[in-house]
Image (cartoon, helix red, strand yellow):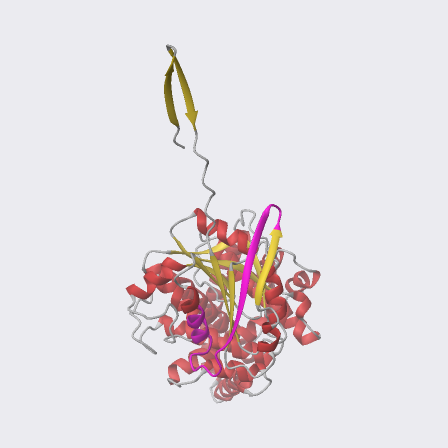
Amino acid sequence: METTITTTMDNGFVSVTSHSPTPEPTRRSSIACVIPAYNEEDTIAEVLDALLAQTRPPEVIHVVINNSTDETFYIARSYAGEHIRTYHDDTFTTYVFVHDIGKNIDKKVGALNYGFAKVSEDFDYLLGVDGDTVLEPDALRLLEQEAEAESRIGGISAIYTVDPKSSKGLVSSFLTTGQRAQFAAFSMDNLLRGRNMAVLGGQCSLFSMQALKDVMTANRQSTPWVSDSEVEDSLLSLQLRSIGAATKISATARAYVGGMHTVRALDGQQVKWNAGAIDLMWPGQRSTTAGQPFHPNLRLRWMENVSMLFNITVRLGFLLLLAASLSINAFVFSPWWLIPPAVAMLLNLRIACSIKGRRARDIWFALLFFPAEIYLWMRMGHFLRAWTKFFSKAQTDNWAAQAKAERGRGAAFLTPLLAAALVIGGAMYAWFQQTAAVQSAILSLGWPVLYITTMVMTLLMIRKAVRRHHGLTA
């Protein structure tokens, strides 16, 4: 702060007066929120209530409704206008605008870009929130603080989990708990990698407006989000890292996302996510995206896919070898085979204990082993379906497929079961066509290979189970 000194001469005496200018008020960064909404009549009111109740709400909220056939527009419209919120000594004014852009072929991407065009010139940050994501009261304040503390941050994501209160019925409760464990494992992996986030999920992420504009310039795009990928958030995260911006996960800001409550709906969502990730791992399949499969943001994707491949190999190999051994009375039980399930249970328990606000069913999901194992088998099915789509080069609208699944239509989720039945049936038929010598040779080679593979995977699980979490929670 500068000080102005004025001197005057009066009857031989010098008078010195110090003038300190009135300090200018600290400028508050400005935040615009964009909510792409597709048939969100059940959740949009709760989403808007949570945003308006933030300890630091956004200056403006644009609800962009697209392709909807329900009452989302009429519910959101009741929130349109000015909202004043006082928290401690601060007063915030938020303006809510509701846009129904009708049929939009670019779906969520088109809605996000529509909202971006409304706010790109007047705000420092853009907060993207899904129409079924409910923020904790201090989430936006924490995201803003972390973004302001590090100028390199191009985007920062909240920690996500599925609200356990949203489940209805036994199947829904099982799937909700599985998704909570899945989100927790993913979040903890990112938190322990220097909080470097591979994917700034569209559920709740705060983006630097300047970083979004830099992405547009660097990639010669007219909008930040493009329809080159069905996982638009993953592609944007990759592009942000490519221009030198950091993509982070918050250590404290949290949000509850909409979960999938039927097996069919979960399959539609997960296959879309996996298929989109594969598109990015093999760039150029759907667009002119530069080929960079070992980009830092894709390393975690590769690790996830390799891990899933080993999970499938070990489990399917064990079932086939076990059935083959029993068929000729050659199976001898060894207690060593109890170690991998025990380690898996401990790892699942460690993940469950890392969930903030964990519930008893999160713990039991891990301790009983079989619920987590069944959920993993389901994820393996999603993995296989996504890779099958890639190798078949099938041009599928996975957004439409997910929407169809959430409406309770379609039977594609049963495909992995049918495929597994065919593989096992075919393998057993081939087995019984072999001579005793060939069968013995297969078992002599197959079991040792399985031992070694399982041992490596068990050691990797032990490493993850004993690593320090440094007080972080998912």
333, 144: nearer the viewer: 144
**Foreground pick, 388 / 170:** 170
Side of 392 where 468 appears, left or right = right
Whether residue 132 is visible: yes
Q: Where is residue 212 in the image (x, y as percent from the top left)?
A: 37, 62
The N terminus: image quadrant: top left
When the figure is inspected, residue 112 is found, relative to residue 352, above or below; the finding is below
* Depth check, front residue: 125 or 25: 25
- On the image, the x and y values in percent for residue 260 come to 59, 74
Q: Can residue 336 be seen in this view?
A: no
Residue that extends furthest to the top in the rendered view of this protein: 12
- Which portion, as a residue range, is magenta? 87-115
The C terminus lies in which quarter of the figure? bottom right
Seen at 62% across and 64% down, the residue is 49
Measured as percent of width and height from the top left, residue 378 is found at: 56, 75
Question: Does residue 409 appear left or right of residue 441 in this picture?
Answer: right
